[in-house]
Image: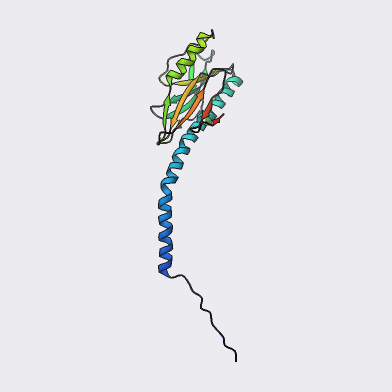
């Protein structure tokens, strides 16, 4: 005679499912603050990266078109955007000056809510003094309500230092050390992105 043993299949009980979901909810709740910090750091890095991309575009367009471009930084309103010099001798109604581009790269870009922008006037002034001391002929700066970095058809770029600060106070720098160098991003760990 053969004995047949039935194996019962055991399923999860409702209590076990609730317990597993509770453990998962606790793990997610512990991970959220760490993820917020990661996102905050990325906001400053992405903002600096956008400025770098705009600067490279402005420099190449200034050279290609033979007109000056500007990367305008408005720390008060936390925005940055490109403009280019326009002068049409055949159109008397259009005053010569810097105008927005009207293309995708000419959009007004806004820094993330938890990111602060700082323009360092002292850095640019020191670079201009050093250039003047070596006998370089510097273009006259036109007064502007919004600080800017100017790109010329000769490939020269204004010296600048822009600090992009995240909510934790970590500083990413957008810097152009001299008129003959290109803008680069210096990350908080000291690595250079150009």
Q: Residue furthest top?
A: 135
Residue 33 against residue 90 in the figure, above or below: below
Q: Residue furthest front?
A: 189
Whether residue 175 can be seen here: yes
Q: Residue at x 50, y 33 (%)?
A: 189
Q: Residue furthest left?
A: 76
Q: Position of residue 84 (x, y in %)?
A: 52, 21
Residue 142 against residue 12 in the figure, above or below: above
Q: Position of residue 156 (x, y in %)?
A: 56, 17
Q: Residue at x 52, y 32 (%)?
A: 49
- Scheme of image coloration: rainbow
In this rendered view, identify the residue nearer to me: 146 or 91.
146
Q: Quadrant of the C terminus?
A: top right
Whether residue 103 can be seen here: no
Task: Report the label total.
Answer: 0
Q: Position of residue 1 (x, y in %)?
A: 60, 92
Q: Horizontally, is 98 left or right of 60 in the view?
A: left
Q: Position of residue 140 (x, y in %)?
A: 48, 11
In this rendered view, identify the residue nearer to me: 158 or 29.
29
Q: Residue furthest bottom?
A: 1
Q: Residue at x 56, y 26 (%)?
A: 56
Q: Horizontally, is 106 left or right of 14 in the view?
A: right
């Amino acid at each position: 005679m053969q004995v047949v043993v039935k194996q019962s299949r055991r399923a999860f009980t409702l209590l076990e499912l609730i317990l597993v979901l509770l453990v998962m909810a606790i793990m997610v709740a512990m991970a959220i603050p760490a993820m917020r910090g990661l996102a905050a750091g990325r906001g400053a890095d992405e903002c600096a990266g956008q400025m770098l991309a705009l600067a490279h575009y402005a420099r190449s367009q200034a050279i290609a078109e033979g007109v000056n471009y500007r990367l305008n930084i408005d720390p008060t309103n936390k925005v940055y955007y490109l403009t280019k010099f326009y002068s049409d001798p055949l159109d008397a109604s259009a005053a010569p000056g810097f105008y927005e581009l009207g293309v995708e790269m000419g959009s007004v870009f806004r820094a993330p809510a938890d990111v602060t922008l700082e323009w360092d006037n002292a850095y640019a002034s020191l670079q201009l003094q050093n250039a003047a001391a070596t006998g370089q002929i510097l273009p006259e700066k036109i007064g502007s309500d919004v600080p800017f970095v100017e790109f010329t058809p000769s490939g020269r770029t204004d010296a600048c230092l822009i600090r992009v600060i995240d909510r934790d106070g970590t500083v990413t720098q957008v810097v152009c050390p001299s008129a003959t160098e290109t803008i680069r991003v210096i990350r908080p760990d000291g690595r250079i992105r150009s």
